[in-house]
Structure formats: structure tokens, C-alpha cells
Amino acid sequence: MSSTFGKVLTITTFGESHGPAVGVILDGCPPGIPLDAESIQRDLDRRRPGQSAVTTQRKEPDKVEVLSGVFEGVTTGATIALVVRSVDARPQDYANLKDLFRPGHADYTYWKKYGVRDYRGSGRSSGRETVGRVAAGAVARRILEKEGAGVQAYTVQVGDLVAKERDLEFAEQNAVRAPDRKAAVEMEQAILKAREAGDSLGGVIEILASGIPAGLGDPVMDKLDASLAWGLMSIGAVKGFEVGEGFAAARAAQGDQPPQRVAGLR
């Protein structure tokens, strides 16, 4: 079962949804990068469940432990190991699903492929696997900052509600991480309404990468777009990926002007 992504900087996530811990191993991080647990914790706190009514209500502090690869506040060039212990793991809550395959949770395909099924909250296919990705991303953020590059993600659509503004500072100040003050309120209300009805809503996330040097990736199989799609599409909840105008380009007639918005990844 592959759990590794990357070539120069590789990350390998580990752990199950209701196991004792989740985390990530990083190889290839250059030495001398300023890094401490607090800087990683800031990104994990943005992901942490139970922060508002629009997220999962599982109560996890998601406190990171840096086990290796950092000394006196800088990376050493050695393998970095990051672990997050689970304190609200309740595998017993899933006992009634032991013999019940759930649609959309990869239960049946896992069982057919491996002959073993972890029914505790979807095991490795759970969204909790992304804890390791976020922790690794915090390290990557420090590397990018040294090169003058940065990445920010924000919500531009929930259900039929679409953000028309791009106030990126405001995106960090609301529960749904939307860059539009009016849309953020409407999105939150729509999510709460769906929850009350026992339902959920999908959405669209836009990612803006700035200060990126030219020449990343290779011309054919390892082009940058392909690598980005590989990483993002491996997240369980992601079902579509586009760069720039993406899918909208297929609907545009020749000579049409694309909609005015921040160029980025969606």
C-alpha cells in the first residue's frame, strides 16, 4: 500500500483514523531551515477538528511531536519524523459496522484487495490521514518561504454558493475559509442546514501559489500540472482538479474572455 509522495522531498504518512497516532516521515529536507514544533502546530491548528459547527465534531488537540531531524531550531538534513497522538479515538463506536460495507468509504475494495478490513472510521482511507500531509506541508512552507514563494488555499464554492470576491486576508478569519464576506455567511448557513437534515455539501477550493520559480517539472510525464494533480487527487475527498480556467476552457467559445479572477489552482 503506497503512502509516499514526492521525489526530491518525499513524504510518507502513517496511521489509521482511530489508531493510537498518525504522522509523517520526510526525507530530503535541506539542512538549516528554521523549524520548530510551534510553526508546524500553527498549520495543524487550522485543520484541527471541532473548531466550529461546520467541521467534524471529533475532539482532537492534534499536538505535534518532532521526533527527529531538527536540532536547536533548524533542520539537520536528516529524516524528519512528526507524530500526532490520538486522544479521541473510539474504535468501539464502529463495532456495528464490522460486517457492513459502507458506500464511498473504500471498505469493499480494501477488503477485496488486501483480505483485511479496518472498519474503525475508514482506517487509512479516513480524512484523518491528512494530518500527516498538513504537518509535512508546514515543513514545505518553511522551505518555500526561504525561496520567496508562498501558497494559500481558500474556499470559493460550497454547494451552489460561489465566492465572487478574493479578500485573502478575510479568508483566514471565518469558519469556512472563504475570501468573500457575504458568501462566507451564506456558506456557513448552508452547511449547518445540510447538517441538520443529516446531509452534507461539496465544495471547491482554490489554491494560489506565488513567487514560484520558472522551470519546475519536466516537459512530459512529470510536468508540474501532473505532479500537482497526483498529490491533490490522492486526497480522498478530492474528485476534480483544474489549473487556471481548467474545465471552463472547454465551455468557452473561440475569442471569449475568461472570467476575471485570481489565477491559481482549483
Image (spheres, grey):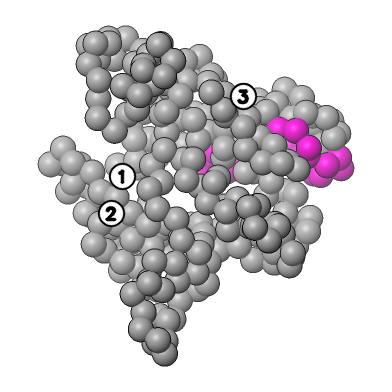
- Label 2, on which residue? 188
- Three-letter amino acid code at the position of disc 3: Val
- Residue drawn at 51 percent across, 47 percent down: 232
Q: Give the CA separation, mark 2 to mark 1.
A: 7 Å
Q: Residue at x 44, y 67 (%)?
A: 246
Estimate the x, y position of residue 70 in percent, counting from the top left.
Answer: 80, 31
Over which residues does the magenta segment extend?
26-47
The local secondary structure at tag 2 comes to helix
For the residues labelled 2 and 3, say whether their Cβ atoms are less than 8 Å apart. Answer: no
Mark 1 vs 3: CB contact within 8 A: no
Name the one closer to the observer, 220 or 66. Answer: 220
Q: Residues within 10 Å of mark 3 (few under 14, many from 20)?
A: many
Q: Alpha carbon of mark 2 to alpha carbon of mark 3: how far?
A: 31 Å
Question: Dot 2, how many residues are within 10 Å of its Cα: few (below 14), some (14-19), or many (20+)?
Answer: some
**Residue 54 disc label:** 1
In this rendering, the answer to whether 223 lies above or below 79 is: below
Nearest to viewer (mark 2 / mark 3) = 3
The image position of residue 7, as x and y in percent, is: 71, 41
- Can residue 88 be seen from the camera position used here? no
Instruction: Please report contact status of discs 2 and 1: CB closer than 8 Å, yes or no.
Output: yes
**Amino acid type assigned to the residue bearing label 1 in the image:** Val
